[in-house]
Image (spheres, rainbow, N blue to C red):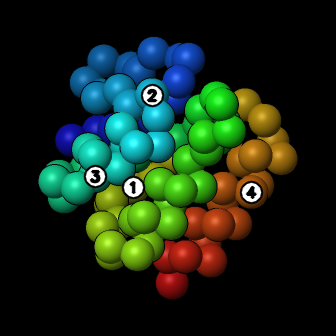
Amino acid sequence: MNLWVDNIRKPPDGWVWAKSSSGAIDALCFGMVQRLSLDYDLGDGDTTCSVIRWIRENSMWPREIRIHCTNPVSVDWLTGLIDRCHK
């Protein structure tokens, strides 16, 4: 499964859409996510940082993680978090 996590932008064809971190975690629980694409800010204080922490705590790393966020600071933040958590 390909999982797109973004509260605003629609996913490309063939991707499942999660609009919140809890929705993303619900999808990840099944262990079938092969590719994950993340925005950072999901609105109302929700971010994908909690998704990365959940993945780390449960050792459910997708084969590929992409960041499609347009804010370069947020991209750097998520990239650093992923690098620190996935060693």
Image marks 3 and 2: residues in contact by CB distance under 8 Å: no
Secondary structure at badge 3 equals helix
- Neighbour tally class for label 2: few under 14, some 14-19, many 20 plus, Cα within 10 Å: some
Whole-number angstrom distance, CA of label 1 to CA of label 4: 18 Å
Q: Which mark sits nearer the N-terminus, 1 or 4?
A: 1
Q: Nearer the viewer, mark 1 or mark 3?
A: 3
Q: List the residue tagged with mark 3.
A: 28
Nearer to me, 20 or 59: 20
- Neighbour tally class for label 4: few under 14, some 14-19, many 20 plus, Cα within 10 Å: some
Q: Nearer the viewer, mark 2 or mark 1?
A: 2
Q: Which mark sits nearer the N-terminus, 3 or 2?
A: 2
Q: List the residue tagged with mark 1.
A: 64
Whole-number angstrom distance, CA of label 2 to CA of label 1: 19 Å
Q: Nearer the viewer, mark 2 or mark 4?
A: 2
Q: Position of residue 32 (x, y in %)?
A: 17, 52
Residue visible at 43% across and 73% down? 56
Whole-number angstrom distance, CA of label 3 to CA of label 2: 13 Å
Residue visible at 23% across and 56% down? 29
Q: List the residue tagged with mark 2.
A: 19
Whole-number angstrom distance, CA of label 1 to CA of label 3: 13 Å
Image marks 1 and 4: residues in contact by CB distance under 8 Å: no
Q: Is residue 76 above or below residue 56?
A: above
Say whether residue 67 is visible.
Answer: no
Q: Position of residue 1 (x, y in %)?
A: 21, 41
Q: Amino acid at mark 2?
A: Lys
Classify residue 64 as left or right of residue 80.
Answer: left
Q: Residue furthest right?
A: 73
Nearer to me, 53 or 36: 53
Secondary structure at badge 4 equals helix
Badge number at residue 77: 4
Give residue 23's quadrant in the image. Answer: top left
Q: Position of residue 74 (x, y in %)?
A: 76, 46
